[in-house]
Structures are given as structure tokens and as C-alpha cells.
Image: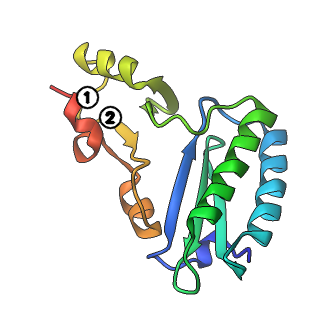
Amino acid sequence: MLVDFTALPDDSRIWIYQSNRKFSEEEVAVMQEKTNAFLTQWTAHGANLEAGFEIKYDRFIVLGLNQANASASGCSIDASVHFIQELEKEFDLDLMDKMNVTFYNGNFIAHKTLTDFRKMAKNRSVSKNTVVFNNLVNTKEEYQENWEVPASESWHNRFLA
């Protein structure tokens, strides 16, 4: 069952998929339509899942699930991953690679491999104050409060001197 992302409770489970590039306006429109359709029919063992989504900064797809009514099962999580993989293929994107880092570089959002981010940290091109996107957050509340944080407050801190 599709609901507005803002209506999901703070303890809703979330999944964040970051793209290796910015989405075009046309891609965002199609992704919104396809994600609406997917979440409308998303179920776990026959029970409708109360889920919402948002596309942030034309670069991130954030799925949210209110687990109070029904939790995602292995099969329903597999279905969502398959859905994201379909988007990857259709739009020639990389949304599943967790070995990439997205961060602010001035007013722009940069996307680098973890290896490149480590090199940037070593060369002091990024610092503990660089705002990174911590895609390891698990709940909507964590997403709202701890997703965009200085690298010193994230798992990225291990790469900084």
C-alpha cells in the first residue's frame, strides 16, 4: 500500500539507493511512476506493505516501510532489490554498489569510489568536516537526523587523518 513518505512513522525501516550520477527530470518522472506502481502492489506473504518513497537530490531513491502493520520478508526484500535492479538496467545506473561514497564538494554532490575517497582523505581533499551521505542509516528518524553528516560523525571517519 503506497503512502506519502512524510506520513511514515519515524521508526519505519528505510533503504537508500545512491546513484552514480544525477537523474534527469524525465528519469525522475518515470522513476516516480514506476516506484508508485511497485509500492502499490508490494506485499509480504500476501499482506500489503505500507510503504512510501522519495527521490532526493535527483540522485538517491529512498524506500520507507512502516513495519508496525507488516514487516518485509525475505521474498519482499528480494522483490524490492529486483525492482531497483530493473531501474538500474532501464536507466543505465549503478544503484546497488555500496562501495561508493557520495558527499558534498562545495555546493555540488560528488560520487566517488571508496578507493578514490580514501585517496582524497589522504591528500586532504576531504576532511572530517566534509558532509557525507551516511547510507547505513536504518530508520526514517536516523535518515532525517543522521544521513547528511560531517564525515567525522559517520563510518567515513576511519579514512580521515
SS state under label 1: loop
Q: Residue 16, position in %: x, y? A: 53, 51
Q: Quadrant of the C terminus?
A: top left
Instruction: Kindly indicate the quadrant of the structure image that contains residue 137.
Output: bottom left
Q: What residue is disc 2 on?
A: 130
SS state under label 2: loop
The kind of residue tagged 1 is Ser
Is 7 on the left or on the right of 115, as rendered? right
Q: What residue is disc 1 on?
A: 127
Is 138 on the left or on the right of 52, as rendered? left
Contact check, label 1 and label 2, Cβ < 8 Å: yes
Is 99 on the left or on the right of 149, as rendered? right
Query: Relative to residue 159, is residue 42 depicted above or below?
Result: below
Q: Residue 3, position in %: x, y? A: 70, 76
Say few, some or many: other residues with alpha carbon within 10 Å of mark 2 (under 14 / 14 to 19 / 20 or more). Answer: some
View extreme (left): residue: 161
The span from disc 1 to disc 2 (Cα, nearest Å) is: 5 Å
Query: Relative to residue 108, is residue 72 depicted above or below?
Result: below
Q: Residue at x 77, y 46 (%)?
A: 28
